[in-house]
Image: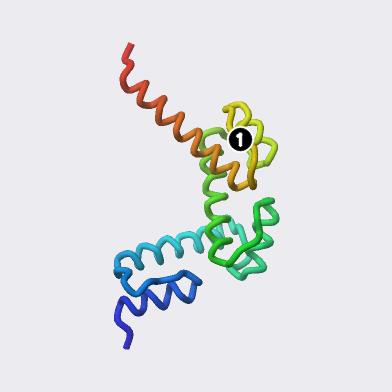
Amino acid sequence: LLDNVSALREALLVRGEGCSEVELAVQMFDRLAERLKQECFLISPHRKLTQSLALEDLQAACAERMISSSGSRTELIRRLFLFQRNCDHMVTLDPTFVCTLGRMQDMLTARSLSKIGAKEELLNRLVESIGTSSLAASRINSHCNI
C-alpha cells in the first residue's frame, strides 16, 4: 500500500520528473499539478497542439512551430507549453500578432533588445519586455490623474 508521498513521487518519476527524498508532499503535489496542466493543455481536444505526449509527437509539434525539438520528453512538454502560452498572451495583447520569427525580431529591434537566440527565447524576451513596460505604464497611470 502506497502512502501519499510515495504515490506522488511515483507519479512524478513516471513522467520523467526528478524527486528528492526530502521534498515535501505539498511541493510534489504542486509540481505534479503543474505538469498535468501542461499535458492537458497540449492534448486538449479543443486545440490539439500535439497528437500525443510521445517523444516523437512532441518533437514534431516543436518542429512545426520552428522551436527547438531536442531534449527530453519533460523538456519538450515544458518548452511547447510555455511557447504556446506566450504566443497566446501576445495575441491577447495585440490581436494582429503572429508568432513568427520575423515578427518577433522586428518587435525586439523596436525595443532595442537582442535578436540572438532560439525562437522560444526571443518570444520569452519579448513577453518579459512587454510585461515590464505594461507594469511600468500601469504604475505611471495609477499615479497620474490629470
Relative image position of residue 87 (x, y in whole percent):
57, 44
Q: Nearer the viewer, residue 62 or 98?
A: 62
Relative image position of residue 96 (x, y in whole percent):
61, 33
Q: Nearer the viewer, residue 134 or 93?
A: 134
Relative image position of residue 129 (x, y in whole percent):
50, 34
Residue 64 position (above or below residue 133): below
- In the image: residue 22, left or right of residue 123: left
- In the image: residue 58, left or right of residue 90: right
* Residue found at the far top of this picture: 146
How busy is the neighbourhood of tag 1: few (under 14 within 10 Å), some, or many (20 plus)?
few
Disc 1 is placed on an element classified as loop
Q: Residue at x 51, y 58 (%)?
A: 41
Q: Amino acid at mark 1?
A: Ser
Residue 18 position (above or below residue 100): below
- In the image: residue 24, left or right of residue 104: left
Q: Quadrant of residue 134?
A: top left
Q: Residue at x 34, y 75 (%)?
A: 21
Location of mark 1 (residue) = 114
Q: Nearer the viewer, residue 66 or 44?
A: 66
Relative image position of residue 123 (x, y in whole percent):
58, 42
Residue 68 position (above or below residue 142): below
Q: Residue at x 55, y 59 (%)?
A: 42
